[in-house]
Image: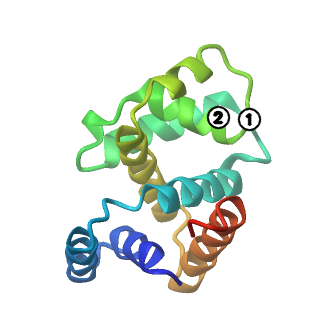
Amino acid sequence: MKDETKFLRALLRQDWETYDSFTEKFQNGGKGTPVAIIGYSFFVAVQRRFSESRDAGEVIRFVADARARLLEGRELPAKEGEALIYAMLDMDMPGVEEIVDSLDVGVMAEIQGQLLFRLVEDAEMADEQLDELLLEAEQLLRQAHPVEY
């Protein structure tokens, strides 16, 4: 498991000591937050949660619940969160492409990270299950960007 993936694992498990250690390591190395692994992990988690139903109402309820239950959930933009999930599911919903295209990479990663936390928590993943999800995301990322990752 690469450091970027271990960083995300620490964030999702709220292991702040490890998270801080990786944050410092990335900053000292001139790297920012590893947004790519967040996006790919979000993709895998969304596929696992919604791919069979692909129900817009279920997506809306999930995002509303995430906004209500997350510590900073009120700051989570509902339409953008829903649009990111629709995009991961390749659902043809009005305005999704425009919303996603308008998002800054950092904002997108922040929204995906918050929703990913809820997806992992809702699934009540054991450590082994979380590692499986993260390793699948890491493999997809490596396939898409073999030179960079």
Residue farthest toward the top in the current orientation of the protein: 94
Give the residue at x 71% y 33%: 55
Residue wearing tag 2:
87
Give the residue at x 42% y 28%: 78
User: Which kind of residue does numbered mark 1 sit on?
Assistant: Asp
Image color mode:
rainbow
Local SS, label 1: loop
Q: CA distance from mark 2 to mark 1?
A: 5 Å
Seen in the picture, residue 84 relative to 10 is either above or below; the reply is above
Q: Position of residue 110 (x, y in %)?
A: 36, 46
Left or right: 60 in relation to 86: left
Seen in the picture, residue 130 relative to 48 is either above or below; the reply is below
Q: Position of residue 146 (x, y in %)?
A: 67, 67
Q: Residues within 10 Å of mark 1 (few under 14, many from 20)?
A: few
Nearer the observer, 94 or 121: 94
Looking at the rendered structure, which numbered label has been put on residue 42?
Answer: none
Q: Position of residue 116 (x, y in %)?
A: 48, 55
Q: Residues within 10 Å of mark 2 (few under 14, many from 20)?
A: some
Quadrant of the snapshot with the C terminus? bottom right
Q: How many marks?
A: 2
Seen in the picture, residue 121 relative to 25 is either above or below; the reply is above
Nearer the observer, 54 or 139: 139
Looking at the rendered structure, which numbered label has been put on residue 90?
Answer: 1
Residue farthest toward the right in the current orientation of the protein: 52
Give the residue at x 56% y 61%: 41
Local SS, label 2: helix
Give the residue at x 56% y 65%: 148
Discs 2, 1 touching: Cβ within 8 Å: yes
User: Which kind of residue does numbered mark 2 sit on?
Assistant: Ala
Left or right: 142 in relation to 125: right
